[in-house]
Amino acid sequence: MATFLYKLGRFAFRRRGLVTLLWVLIVCGVGAAASSAPTPPTEQFSMPGTESQKAFDLLEEKFPDAGADGATARVVIRAPEGKKIADEKAAIGELLGELGKAPQVSGVADPFAAGSISEDGRTAYAVVTYGVAAPDLTDEAHDALTKATDRARDGGLTVEAGGDAVAIEQTMSGTGEQIGVLISAIVLFLTFGSVLAAGMPLLTALIGVGVGVSAITALGSTFGLSATTSTLAMMIGLAVGIDYALFVVSRYRAEVGEGRTPQEAAGIATGTAGSAVVFAGLTVIIALGGLAVVNIPILTKMALAAAGTVAVAVLIAVTLVPALLGFAPRRVLRVADRRLVQTKKPLSARKLRKSEKKAAKLAARTKPNLSTRWASFVVRRPLGVLFLAVVGLGAIALPATKLELGLPGEGTMATDTTQRKAYDLLSDSFGPGFNGPLTVTVEGKDAAAAGDKVGESLKKTAGIASVSKATANKAGDTAIFSIVPKTGPTDGETEQLVKDIRVKATSLEASSGATEILVTGQTALFIDFSQTLSDALLPYLALVVGLAFLLLLLVFRSVLVPLKAALGFLLSVSAALGALVAVFQLGWAAGFFGIEQTGPIMTTLPIFMIGVVFGLAMDYEVFLVTRMREAYVHGASPKDAVVTGFRHSGRVVVAAAIIMISVFSGFIFETDDLVAMMGFGLASAVLFDAFVVRMAIVPAVHSLLGDAAWWLPKWLGRLLPNVDVEGERLRRRLQTAPPSPAPRSTPDHEGDLVH
């Protein structure tokens, strides 16, 4: 691997014009495809194999008219204090008339005719049906709904509206990317001390994100990829893109500083740091691609789109980055280093070895950097550091024991939104279960009669507030009726009620004459969704951790290093979940993060976060431990290898972590709940994993294990291919190669020496 990437890096450096042109063509081609792509269709939520989805598919087949995709708005009306809805019949009639004349409206249900009035007579609701789906509603239609309800409020009524026809103010502001890029630029400049070196990772990361997001847009209409999919791919692609380029540029500068020609340094940087990038990227791709086993299409699309963006970031790091280094091989160095290096002549292999020995002696006399001092401290006191790190992460993870999962809905919106107010009015007036009715489908020869029998039998079930009369389709072979629970959609009692109804439904099939009875509805769908994720969690973890374990086994040729990496990941992700629950669910410091409404953590988030965090955690494991192994295989003792690895990689890993944290943190302040939670969770996970697990636990464990950390059974060593990620064989090849003649130097237009 290292040798192949070494050749690739030299080729990209030497043929930089060609490589850059190819990437420009890719960017232009994907951009053109994205600009001409049609608007993607509305993303349909589905869960193959669940009872809820089976019932939805049945309703779509048997009740095609009822299954129309027209948007709806439920307008809730409450009479002034001391009055009844009947007293406001004229004002309500005026409101309904105005709603009926609004653009794209196909019908309005009169609450007096439909009987949708509360028992106390103070609250009613009217259902407004539109002729088009929610995404196709025009601004005029939204404005007409808002103006009609505002006028009714001016007349003294309390009027709020919910449903998918009501506009939701959740647009991506772009602030997240801007904040992340700004902080990344500052960190890169402080790390490199060069504007050009700082700008290169930013430029290549933005190119990678541009290619990835454009591809998602171009394919959106074909695969139904949503705006949220693009945002998550952008978030992850930007973070890893900067980090991957950072490691290659950093290694290039180190190699040039040791006296190698720029072309040779680009090859070695791509062969060593590039190998780490490839395997780190593979762990992220494996972790994201593994989400396909959950078998939830919307989650699979999000994960695969993000994985594709990561793959683009890897390709850019090992091709475009060395090519761009070729355009300014000296100007990516610090000013002092640039002057020093320009006075040097290319060294032969023999002189290069002498130069490295002199550099080592000089380094021994100079004050060690902060990373070296920290690693030396940890290897002297490994038990104390390990204990404090594990206990600290365990304490932060404690709130995760109170984790409550749910899906976004009107009941979780901010209390000042009209949707939430409408939700609360309906709950107060019609009961908490009114906002989450269950739909029961009954198939049979005489479906209407069978449906009524099933409904009568289910009325006796504890937790049911009301059961409607069954309605059959035109063919008479399928009937539906609604059940209103006594408890709210997200209550545990409602989940238990769904389970009880399904158990009873099985026994009622024979006695009622039904061939099949299914329970669905939004509440049942959410319950099945949560259960599907719970059932898939262990197989997913087994698949991802297993594949990543094998990958790290190849990289480090060690049994204990992959095991330690996986255990460290569990600590960091548990702490991140604890922090997520503390802020978004329990409300600790919610005001600081601009969180207006706390509530359950989104059901999709933990498993998606586990996949992403596992991949990112392995990034730092690969980058840091690869340098440690490189020192170990070259003869350093285990403790010295730890210190050497930190001396070379510690500062860069810290910079990479800060960049990734800043990128993710910028998304916390977006209005999209899923994006905000994801940004906070990933930023927390990187913080804990990079600064506690990789910077404290990893050196402590390696210090305690000693040589055992790199133990590999001989029989397994013979079976495993040696991918040479640390570049041992590459270094031997370079040292035994005959010295090459000094390359001719020609000044380029920027004044650099191009070799």
Image (cartoon, rainbow, N blue to C red):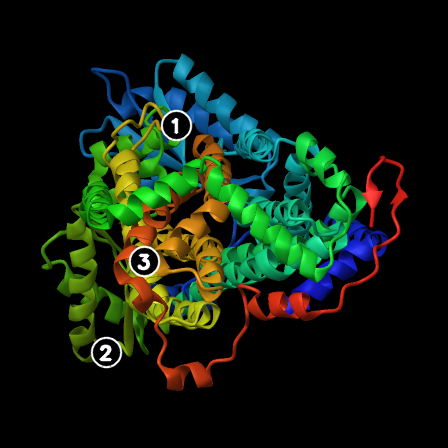
Q: Residue 305: give x, y in percent of width and height.
A: 56, 57
Q: 160 or 286: nearer the eye?
A: 286
Q: Residue at x 37, y 68 (%)?
A: 710
Q: Is residue 174 above or below residue 376?
A: above
Q: Residue at x 28, y 79 (%)?
A: 515
Q: Amino acid at mark 1?
A: Thr
| Secondary structure found at label 3 | helix
Of the two numbered discs 1 and 2 on the same chain, state the one appearing first in sequence. Answer: 1
Gap in angstroms between the C-alphas marked 3 and 1: 56 Å
Question: Which quarter of the rendering shows the N terminus?
Answer: bottom right
Q: 428 or 152: nearer the eye?
A: 428
Residue with the mark numbered 2: 513
Residue with the mark numbered 3: 702
Q: Residue 748: give x, y in percent of width and height.
A: 88, 41
Q: Residue 417: give x, y in percent of width and height.
A: 39, 27
The image quarter in which residue 495 lies: bottom left
Gap in angstroms between the C-alphas marked 1 and 2: 44 Å
Residue with the mark numbered 1: 418
Gap in angstroms between the C-alphas marked 2 and 3: 68 Å
Q: Amino acid at mark 3?
A: His
